[in-house]
Image (cartoon, grey):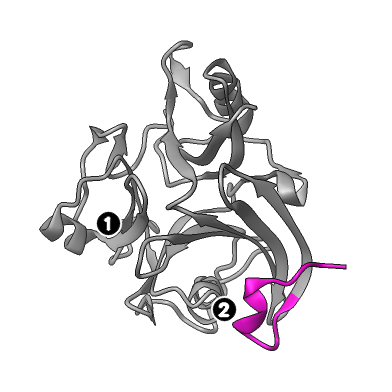
Amino acid sequence: MLRSSPLRRFLPALVILAAGTVQGHADAIDCQRIEFEGDRYSVCQVDASQQEIRLFLNDDRKDRPFGSFDNVAEQLHAEGKVLRFGMNAGMYHQDRSPVGLYVENGKQIAPLITRDGPGNFGLLPNGVFCIRETRADVIETLRFQREAPECRFATQSGPMLVIDSELHPRFLPKSDSRYIRNGVGTDKDGRNIWFAISEAPVTFHAFGRLFRDVLRLPQALYFDGNISKLFAPGLGRHDGGLPMGPIVGVVGDGS
């Protein structure tokens, strides 16, 4: 029998297929497999005030990008830590360097990009996932530029999926562009962070409505499509395959 889920209060038509948790230092990482309007997703909720969230790009010991959850877990093991959750966290170039802003441990590795351009990243408005000590926020890029928040970690990606509780204006309900997609959304307090990945190809419109209408989040950001990957032990999920660029992870004590 599945335990009670916070998702049940959001939408009566939602079907919860499976649930699992991974214990962190205070609260659990709550992961669920759900079905919404015929499409299946894996979603994981993280409490940013209780969990340590980091971004990972390059393994300096080996002079190369991490590329995989296993490589991140190996470094964390050397620190006496464990990887409790992971997901690819933004688009990257052929050498796996990030497209757009990337900040790690307060150091800017790549600059903010504000112009439009080709591909999903350039489909404005895009945004930044900004991680601070006890909160994390998805922030639209031009607002991020104006407010200049200090982020311990940050990754820019695009397009935005939800902006101030509205879908991205370019999303079409009857689009024929379908990919496996993943992204992140945040609530107004920056405490509840939801990561989601589709189990099969979906449109931007459907994926955006998952964050807006099911998770009820005012801001959400697209990470990537087709190469989307998830590490969620609570769901028995540990994706491999092609190497990744930026990776977001929840880090716990090794004990």
Q: Residue furthest left?
A: 146
Q: What stretch is highlighted in magenta?
A: 1-15
Task: Check the image and report above or below for 227 versus 202.
Answer: above
Determine whether the residue tagged by mark 1 lies in a helix, strand or loop: loop
Q: In the rendered view, does 146 fall on the left or right side of 66?
A: left
Residue 222 in magenta?
no
Q: How many labels does the image show?
A: 2
- Count residues near mark 2 (Cα–Cα under 10 Å), then give few for <14, some for 14-19, many for 20+: some
Which amino acid does the dot numbered 2 rest on? Val
Relative depth, front residue between 80 and 37: 80
Label disc, if present, on residue 182 of the rendered structure: none
Q: Would residue 98 be visible to someone looking at this image?
A: yes
Quarter of the image where one finds residue 169:
bottom left
Residue linked to disc 2 = 214
Determine whether the residue tagged by mark 2 lies in a helix, strand or loop: helix
Q: Which residue is drawn at 36% across and 50% down?
A: 134
Q: Residue at x 28, y 66 (%)?
A: 125
Residue linked to disc 1 = 117
Q: Which residue is drawn at 68% across and 82% down?
A: 37
Give the alpha-carbon distance from disc 1 to disc 2, as whole Å.
30 Å
Q: Which residue lies furthest to the right in this view?
A: 1
Q: Would residue 246 be visible to someone looking at this image?
A: no
